[in-house]
Image (cartoon, rainbow, N blue to C red):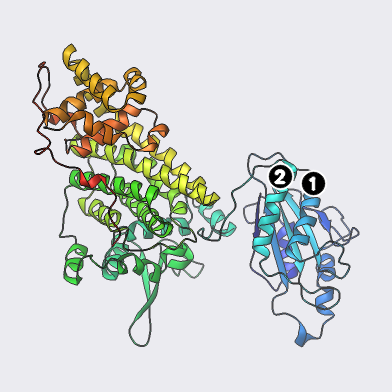
């Protein structure tokens, strides 16, 4: 159940007329009163003798009784209460009870208070009601309605339990502002999937991914086709900004601008500045300017491989570090997802975009991010952006699958952390993002895993037995399960590649299997394939590797020659 406190108003009759009228999109059906401060209050919807003016005058009576100088500038209070789509249709009596509980909880009409405000609850659809009230009490005092939004939300959670309705997650005030009903209706009329507010929020977030300077940020906004208006102080200092879509205009054909802070709390200019301000070892002004010009191009496959390593590091941080560092990693993880969605190939683009959209909510909480600990992920986001769009095939398609696999586990770790902190909305958002990433992975990975599977089946029987022995030696508790998975042959081929490259397969496999997130994987062997290929610096595309059919593959290097995998250890805080 979703209650929403609307802006205070001055026109009681205008709001009454809207509630009883057809609605802006003709969605109001059978408007009628379900409850009011007085059971004899007139109902213009069901009583042909009652008028909008009759109800308005009675609601306004305590306001009009005050001297004009004592009347509040805005006296009309408005709350809408909407059920979830999957909830059963409630009766008028049930909605009346919900209305009484809401006005009591918010301070409009506390239970047993005979001098409370006047109010009325109107139902004009199956799934919601509107409550209108005037905030002057019968005794001439104004209602104490501070924090009415938070109190209405708390009461909604209790109502959900009492009525057996869908239980929504408790918010903490860090969510982005929802589109208004007017914005939603406008988008519906224009046949658009998202409102301008939502489109702008997504575009601005993508522009901020890995950004290193103000100039770069505003250049990206302009390149995305947005109208940008900067707010400058008399001293010349930049104070803020607002953006608009070129085709979103008001009745006077003027662009409708939204400031960054109204799009999301972390998109204000001061919060965006924090992203690079904490990076004391980051690029200097010259390097930042050079990169912002787009001259520092990065190979898409290289960018994805380096991002995979950075995400692995971040998973370790989420497991082992303090809350401020973890919050920084999760904020930067949102940037990586935005950059990945922006540069993804067509067959994964929709799911990655939806994953980034969902995880946006999981990237913010009241825990303050300790900027500077997120350098690796922010640089990864930056490299993804400057690497440009991936083709979705060959090495960059395979490294995309590898990266998606790793990001899935970071997002899963984020869900675990938010759950422990009782960040209900953030945990739910991370879980939703993980499902979209799972779908994106299933679109990206099969063609490469299929090639590895065939390579594994073509290994000689002695080589297959050797790879199985490595598996049992490294992860005895998982070995029998992995050997029954369809992906085992792909893992066997990868172990052969690892050994051919001069690594100790059992040692590297044991290290790859240390992560606790393996139990969330659909296929453990798939996960181990990508981790091994990243750790051994093997091409993600198996077609770039030679076949291994001999019974005696290349002997692994000695321990002294073997490369150490220091990138798989959590970076120390600086």
**Which quarter of the rendered picture does the C terminus lie within?**
bottom left
- Image side of residue 34 versus residue 202, left or right: right
- Image side of residue 426 versus residue 546, left or right: right
Q: Position of residue 62 (x, y in %)?
A: 84, 75
From where the camera sits, is residue 338 visible? yes
Residue toward you, 21 or 427: 427
Q: Is residue 448 above or below residue 515?
A: above
Q: Residue at x 51, y 47 (%)?
A: 419
Tag of residue 305: none
From where the camera sits, is residue 259 visible? no
Q: Which of the 4 image quadrants contains residue 45? A: bottom right
Q: Position of residue 72 (x, y in %)?
A: 73, 80
Q: Position of residue 233 (x, y in %)?
A: 38, 84
Q: Residue at x 32, y 20 (%)?
A: 486
Residue at disc 2, secondary structure? helix
The residue labelled by disc 1 is: 94
Q: Residue at x 35, y 28 (%)?
A: 524
Q: Residue at x 31, y 29 (%)?
A: 526
Q: Earlier in the sequence, mark 2 or mark 1?
A: 1
Measure how far apart labels 2 and 1 are at the Cα level: 14 Å
Q: Which of the 4 image quadrants contains residue 8? A: bottom right
Q: Position of residue 186 (x, y in %)?
A: 53, 56
Tag of residue 161: 2
- Image side of residue 54 versus residue 429, left or right: right
Residue toward you, 285 or 20: 285
């Amino acid at each position: 159940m979703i209650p929403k406190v609307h802006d205070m108003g001055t026109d009681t009759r205008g709001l009454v007329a809207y509630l009883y009228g057809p609605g802006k999109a003709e969605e109001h059906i059978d408007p009628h009163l379900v409850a009011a401060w007085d059971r004899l209050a007139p109902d213009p919807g069901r009583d042909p003798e009652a008028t909008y003016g009759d109800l308005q005058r009675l609601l306004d009576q305590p306001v009009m009784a005050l001297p004009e100088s004592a009347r509040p500038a805005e006296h009309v209070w408005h709350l809408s209460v909407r059920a979830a789509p999957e909830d059963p249709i409630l009766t008028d009596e049930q909605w009346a009870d919900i209305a009484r509980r809401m006005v009591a909880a918010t301070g409009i009409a506390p239970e047993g208070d005979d001098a409370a405000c006047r109010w009325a609850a109107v139902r004009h659809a199956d799934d919601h009601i509107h409550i209108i009230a005037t905030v002057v009490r019968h005794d001439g005092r104004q209602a104490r309605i501070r924090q009415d939004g938070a109190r209405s939300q708390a009461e909604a959670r209790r109502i959900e339990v009492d009525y057996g309705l869908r239980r929504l997650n408790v918010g903490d005030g860090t969510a982005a502002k929802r589109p208004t009903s007017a914005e939603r209706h406008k988008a519906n009329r224009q046949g658009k999937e998202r409102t301008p507010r939502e489109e702008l929020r997504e575009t601005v977030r993508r522009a901020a991914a890995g950004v290193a300077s103000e100039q770069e940020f505003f250049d990206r906004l302009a390149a995305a086709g947005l109208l940008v208006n900067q707010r400058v102080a008399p001293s010349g200092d930049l104070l803020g900004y607002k953006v608009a879509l070129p085709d979103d205009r008001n009745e006077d054909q003027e662009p409708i601008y939204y400031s960054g802070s109204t799009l999301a709390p972390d998109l204000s200019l001061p919060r965006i500045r924090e992203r690079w301000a904490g990076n004391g070892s980051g690029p200097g002004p010259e390097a930042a300017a050079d990169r912002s010009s787009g001259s520092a191009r990065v190979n898409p496959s290289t960018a994805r491989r380096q991002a995979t390593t950075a995400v692995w590091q971040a998973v370790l941080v989420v497991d082992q570090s303090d809350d401020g560092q973890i919050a920084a990693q999760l904020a930067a993880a949102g940037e990586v997802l935005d950059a990945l969605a922006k540069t993804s190939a067509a067959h994964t683009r929709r799911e990655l975009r939806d994953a980034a959209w969902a995880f946006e909510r999981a990237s913010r909480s009241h825990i303050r991010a300790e900027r500077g600990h997120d350098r690796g992920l922010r640089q990864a986001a930056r490299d993804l952006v400057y690497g440009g769009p991936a083709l979705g095939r060959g090495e960059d398609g395979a490294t995309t699958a590898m990266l998606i696999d790793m990001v899935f586990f970071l997002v899963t770790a984020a869900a675990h952390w938010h759950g422990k902190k009782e960040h209900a909305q953030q945990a739910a958002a991370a879980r939703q993002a993980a499902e979209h990433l799972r779908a994106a992975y299933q679109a990206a990975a099969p063609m490469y895993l299929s090639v590895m599977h065939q390579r594994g089946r073509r290994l000689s029987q002695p080589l297959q037995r050797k790879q199985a022995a490595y598996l049992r030696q490294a992860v005895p508790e998982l070995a029998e399960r992995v050997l029954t998975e369809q992906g085992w042959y792909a893992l066997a081929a990868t172990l052969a590649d690892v050994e051919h490259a001069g690594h100790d397969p059992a040692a590297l496999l044991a290290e790859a299997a240390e992560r606790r997130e393996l139990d969330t994987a659909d296929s453990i062997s798939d996960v181990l394939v990508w981790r091994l290929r990243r750790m051994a610096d093997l091409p993600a595309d198996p077609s770039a590797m030679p076949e291994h059919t001999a019974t005696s593959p290349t002997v692994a290097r000695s321990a002294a020659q073997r490369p150490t995998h220091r990138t798989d250890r959590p970076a120390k805080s600086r």
